[in-house]
Amino acid sequence: MADYTTEKELRALFSTTAPNTDHKVSLEALISLHAQDFYKLYLGDDAEFSMTKFYEIRGEQSITTSLWSDPIGEETKYAN
């Protein structure tokens, strides 16, 4: 017996089951989080919840990343 739900089983479940009438979807996931705070938490080179750390927790063995660079400096090479 498989320890996961197959695509066929999921399709059958979702095609026959309607959401409850009082079902609410929360859209306020990151509304109160400033863009700079989001960057610091998830995208910055030393982010607390970075993708690199996510892959390390998953047990990935070979992770290669590079630091963010300033695109403004790169764009000046192509200025007319």
Image: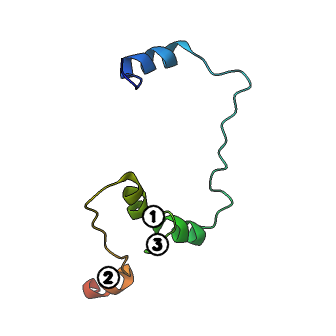
Three-letter amino acid code at the position of disc 3: Gly
Three-letter amino acid code at the position of disc 1: Ser
| Mark 2 residue element | helix
* Numbered circle sitting on residue 22: none
> Neighbour class for label 1 at 10 Å: few (<14), some, many (≥20)?
some
Q: Position of residue 46 (x, y in %)?
A: 46, 74
Q: Is residue 32 above or below residue 46?
A: above
Q: Label 3, label 1: how many angstroms apart (C-alpha)? A: 7 Å
* Mark 3 in CB contact with mark 1 (< 8 angstroms): yes
Q: Which residue is mark 3?
A: 44
Please state if 31 lies on the left or on the right of 5 as rendered: right
* Numbered circle sitting on residue 75: 2
> Neighbour class for label 3 at 10 Å: few (<14), some, many (≥20)?
some
Between discs 2 and 3, the one toward the N terminus:
3
Residue drawn at the location 67% of the way across and 49% of the way down: 28
Question: Quadrant of the rendered structure where residue 31 is?
Answer: bottom right
| Mark 3 residue element | loop
Question: Quadrant of the rendered structure where residue 7 is?
Answer: top left
Q: Label 2, label 3: how many angstroms apart (C-alpha)? A: 21 Å
| Mark 1 residue element | loop
Between discs 3 and 1, the one toward the N terminus:
3
**13 or 59, nearer to the observer:** 59
Q: Which residue is mark 1?
A: 50
Q: Position of residue 19 (x, y in %)?
A: 63, 22
Q: Position of residue 57 (x, y in %)?
A: 41, 56
Classify the position of the C terminus by image quarter.
Answer: bottom left
**4 or 46, nearer to the observer:** 4
